[in-house]
Image (cartoon, rainbow, N blue to C red):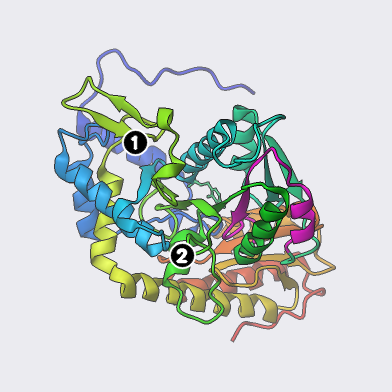
Amino acid sequence: MEEAFVSCLSEYGMAPAKAYQQITEELAGDGNPYQDLGSFTAVRMQPEANRLICDTLGKNLANQNEYGETTSIHKKLVATIADLLHAPDPAHAAGTSTSGSSEACAIAMLMHKWLWQAGTTTESRKPRGIPNIVLGTNAHLVWRKFALYLGVEVREAPFDGINNYPLGAMLSLIDENTICVVAVMGSTFSGFCDPVKEINGALMEMNARNGWNVGIHVDGAIGGFILPFVTNSRKPVWDFALPLVRSINLSGHKFGLVYPGLGWLMLRDQTMIPEHMNMTASYLTGNTQSYAISFSRSSSLVIAQYFNFLHYGRAGYGAVIEKCLKNARHVASGLEAMGCFELISDLTLPVIAFSFTSGLEGREADFTSALRSKGWMLPFYQMPAGIECKAMRIVIREDMSRERLEALLTDIAEAVASLSPQTCLYRQAG
Ligand SMILES: *Cc1c(COP(=O)(O)O)cnc(C)c1O
């Protein structure tokens, strides 16, 4: 039955305390973000960060001259992130905060498209056909979405199997109208990291052979704030250290550890910004320059990112990531010990994608609703083309303590037992 329309704009309003109480009661029906297993975004920050966020909510990031200190903090953050990503000249770094990685991906695609149109990335010829981007099927939906908006053709290379990047198939899709290759550092489906170093090497050779100049955009929404702080030897080379990596997006609100609403677009250097894209607005005090899509945004989440950099430092971020990775390995082996799950993720990042082994296939909906009755929200979805299975995903975030994860493993074991006591070996994780 269709719900009748009820306007929430009353004639005379109500007292703030009453409105507060009513909204709080309504929101109590929401899920608990701490039990949102599939989500990448930060759910908590330090009390001092919360205070700074409240203090700065009313400062508009677009008013750059009015809020000169905020503008200079923004600039410092861009240079710091550029340095973290091995940009050639961090002091003159190019980049901007955005509302999330999605906005950053949209701007990046526009920049690559305009550079291709201007012929500056492809000296030897003028553009002829329809521009295209080339990526693996593990890329996020935003790339298909903005390609559609911007008239760019998407060419997808299907995976050869789990954790097996289709390098050959990807290369065969590139031609003179390719505006860039998108590599994903941390697929949303599994946390799998595309081999950017190999892609860079193969592309250098291909460019030299054909007189092209196809570059790489790295979607670092998940891994962008993880990989710079990982110290183990399996750490991949993926950022501006590779010559063909020209732009990178990161989600400040994922492992940048800031609340939802903050992303970053980082560019190799200023030449990535097409002249006409660097808009100057003169109707506020003085001139302001921006190449983000949004004009007005609160400065509070940029300030929150600044707080995290000052508070955590490199060692603090490193410790958070190390804890998440350790917890991810613990939960993954707990799942494997139950005998009815197959691990999909390689755990380079703290993302655990897994599927049912034979016997329980097709029971994902029953399983996740059994967990939902205990408050846990666990997504399940079809893996991308080339990988024929349904996956479930647990993202191990900063807020997840070992105790809560033990409780989760117990609830998972019970949920599995309720489905099919005879199918699983079902050993309690020790
Ligand atoms: C989350 C995500 C995005 C979208 O980013 P938002 O920050 O949510 O806008 C893009 N790409 C990947 C790989 C992601 O995981």
Please identify the quarter of the rendering in which residue 419 is found.
bottom right
Q: Secondary structure at mark 1?
A: helix
The residue type indicated by label 2 comes to Arg
Q: Is residue 246 magenta?
A: no
Nearer the camera: disc 2 or disc 1: 2
Is residue 172 shown in magenta? yes
**Which picture quadrant has residue 124?**
top right
Is 56 rendered above or below residue 151? below
Tell me where residue 48 appears, x and y as whole percent.
20, 58
Residue 64 appears in view? yes
Q: Residues within 10 Å of mark 1 (few under 14, many from 20)?
A: few
- The residue sitting at 40% across, 53% down in the picture is 252
Q: In the figure, is residue 105 to the left or right of 414?
A: left
| Residue that carries the numbered disc 2 in the rendered image | 397
Q: CA distance from mark 2 to mark 1?
A: 28 Å
Most extreme residue toward the top is 11
Which residue is at a point 79% across and 51% down the rendered structure image? 172
Mark 1, residue position: 23
Q: Quadrant of the N terminus?
A: top right
Few, some or many residues within 10 Å of mark 2 (<14, 14–19, 20+)? many
Q: Amino acid at mark 1?
A: Ile
Q: Tell which of 256 and 167 is nearer to you.
A: 167
**Which portion, as a residue range, is magenta?**
165-190
Q: Position of residue 229 (x, y in %)?
A: 42, 71
